[in-house]
Amino acid sequence: MLKIKYARICVVLLILAGVFAILCPIFSSVSANIILPIISACMAIVCVFATTVIRLSKLKCPSCGKSLAALRWSQEYFCPKCGKPLAYDK
């Protein structure tokens, strides 16, 4: 059984990556300091990398172990490889 907390952590990390990616050009236009856009871009990359690591290690199909489970928040999804439902805890 997959833990829904890992899927939710991945969703939040991807949202944070988007926020940092949006802030990167804003920081570069507002500030003369080059450090803020670089930090923002690095944080976006770290968030995407952390999401990838969590998905590869924690969110695999419990039946076949091959497919990455969809980032479920509330719907039910099925494995594209074996067709079995991806069961998350409550």
Image (cartoon, rainbow, N blue to C red):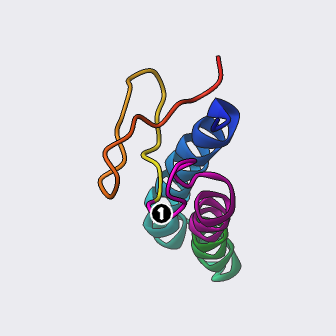
Q: Identify the residue position indicated by label 1 in the image.
A: 21
Q: Is residue 51 left or right of residue 67?
A: right
What range is drawn magenta here?
Answer: 47-67
Rendered location of residue 78, percent (x, y): 34, 39
Above or below residue 19? Residue 87 is: above
Residue at image coords 54%, 57%: 17
Q: Quadrant of the N terminus?
A: top right
Residue drawn at point x = 56 percent, y = 65 percent = 48
Q: Is residue 51 magenta?
A: yes
Under circle 1, the secondary element is helix
> Is 11 on the left-hand or right-hand side of 33?
left
Quadrant placement of the C terminus: top right
Q: Is residue 19 left or right of residue 13?
A: left
In depth, the one of 84 and 52 nearer the eye is 84
**Percent coordinates x, y for residue 15 in the rendering:** 51, 46
Q: Amino acid at mark 1?
A: Ala
